[in-house]
Image: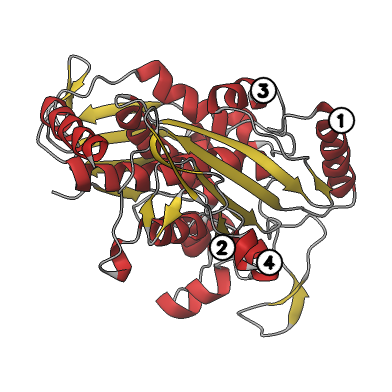
Amino acid sequence: MSLRFLTAGETHGPQLTAIIEGLPSNLQLDFEELNFQLHRRQLGHGRGRRMQIEKDTADIVGGVRHGRTTGAPVALVVTNNDWKHWMTVMNIQPIEGGDEAKRRVNRPRPGHADLNGGLKYNLKDLRNVLERSSARETAARVAVGAVARQLLAAFGIKVAGQVIRIGEIEAPPNNLSVDELISATEQSPVRVVDKETEAKMTAHIDQIKAEGDSIGGIVECIIEGVPVGLGSHVQWDRKLDARIAGAVVSINAFKGCEIGIGFGAGGLRGSQVHDEILYTEERGFHRASNRAGGFEGGMTTGERIVVRGVMKPIPTLYKPLRSVDIDTKKPFTAQVERSDSCAVPAASVVMEHVVAWEVARAFLEKFGGDSIEEIRANLDHYLKQVGRY
C-alpha cells in the first residue's frame, strides 16, 4: 500500500486534522520529537502575532498504541487556540446577522487564492477561500512530515534545512554535515549558520516590516543516508526528484524548486555539471561531486539529497495593493488579514517535512512491508545486493 495523507481544517476553525495511511506497524514514535518539529515551524524572525497565540502540539487519536504504530491509519489533531475568538464567525451552524457578524471578506488580496477560489467555487464570501488556503494548513503537513521523519530516522536517514536567502541578503555556502547544520541553525532566528548574515537578515526583515511590506527568500533541505535507487526512471510519475519538486511548489507561497545546482546548470558546460563516478572498496560506487543534488534519472545516487525552494513575499500587506471589490466592482485597497512580514525561516522547516514525506514514501515503495521488521529485512537484502554489484 502506498503511503498517503489527507488534511482538513481551517485557519480559524477548531482544529487541523491529518490522516496518514500506509505506515508499517511497530514504528516507535517519539511524541516529544513530533511536537518539537511543530514548535520549530512557529519560530523565526518576522513571524506575526498568530504565533504568540498558538502553541502547536499534535494529539494522535488513532493508529498508535503504547507508543507504536499498529499498521492502521494514524490520525493526528492540531488544535487551534485562536478558535475561541472565532466560534461565531466560523461556526458550522447557520448564524444570524449580516456581513459584520460573519466577518465577510469581499475585497480579494493580490497574490492570494481569494479571487480565484471565489470564482471557481462560486463563493461570495472570500473567507471561505482564505480560511483553507492559509499557510496555517502547513502545521498539519509538518505533523505528518514529522512522523515520516521518524520513519526515516529508524533507518539512519537524517534531515536538515537552512535559509539561503532573505530578500537582498544571501548566506555564504557551507559544507556542514546534517548534524552540524541542525546544531547551528537551531541557534539562529533566521536559520542560517553565519552570524554576520543573520544580523543582516534580521535588520532587513525589520526594515521591510517598518515599511508595511513583506519579503521572501530561498530555503534548502539536505537529506543524508538515503540509499541508491529510490524513485525510478521507467515512468515520469515515478521520478523521485520530480515528485519532490511538485511537493515543494505545493507549499503555500512557494514558486519554484531546484535540485543540486539547479538553474545554475543552464549557464555551464557539461564538464562543469556532471558528477564523475568513482569506486573504492570502502564506499563502493560514488561520485566525485554532487552537483546533481543526489539524483540521476529520477533516482537517488546515494549522495546527499539537496533541494532548494523559493518563497515569494507573503501577499497580505499592511500597505495594501490595489484590488477590486467583488460586490461593487469598484477599485479598492485589498483587505488586510493578520499576517507575517517574513515567514522564510518557518518555511524552511515546512520544506524539510514536505521533502521528508516524499523520501519516506519512495522508501516504502522500494522496501515496503507491513512491519518495521519486514522493511528492515528488505533493506538489508538490497544493500547486500548493491554491495556485491
Q: Which residue is mark 2?
A: 104
- Residue toward you, 251 or 339: 251
For the residues bearing labels 2 and 1, Cβ distance under 8 angstroms: no
Residue count near mark 1 (Cα–Cα under 10 Å), binned few <14, some 14–19, many ≥20:
few
Residue 160, percent across and down? 53, 33
Query: Identity of the amino acid at label 3?
Result: Ala
First in sequence, mark 1 or 4: give its number: 1
Q: Quadrant of residue 173?
A: top right
Which residue ends up furthest to the bottom in the rendered image?
329
Query: Identity of the amino acid at label 4?
Result: Leu
- Residue toward you, 179 or 67: 179
For the residues bearing labels 1 and 3, Cβ distance under 8 angstroms: no
- Residue toward you, 298 or 30: 298
Residue 205, percent across and down? 82, 43
Judged from the image, the secondary structure of the residue bearing numbered disc 1 is helix
How many numbered dots are placed on residues in this image? 4
Judged from the image, the secondary structure of the residue bearing numbered disc 3 is helix
Residue count near mark 4 (Cα–Cα under 10 Å), binned few <14, some 14–19, many ≥20:
few
Does residue 205 appear left or right of residue 348 in this picture?
Answer: right
First in sequence, mark 3 or 2: give its number: 2
Q: Which residue is mark 1?
A: 196
Query: Identity of the amino acid at label 2?
Result: Arg
> How far is disc 4 from disc 3 in space, using C-alphas?
32 Å
> How far is disc 2 from disc 4 in space, using C-alphas?
52 Å
The image's mark for residue 268 is: 4
Q: Quadrant of residue 241?
A: bottom left
First in sequence, mark 4 or 3: give its number: 3
> How far is disc 1 from disc 3 in space, using C-alphas?
13 Å
For the residues bearing labels 1 and 4, Cβ distance under 8 angstroms: no
Mark 2 or 4: the one toward you: 4
User: At 52% across and 50% down in the image, what residue appears?
Assistant: 293
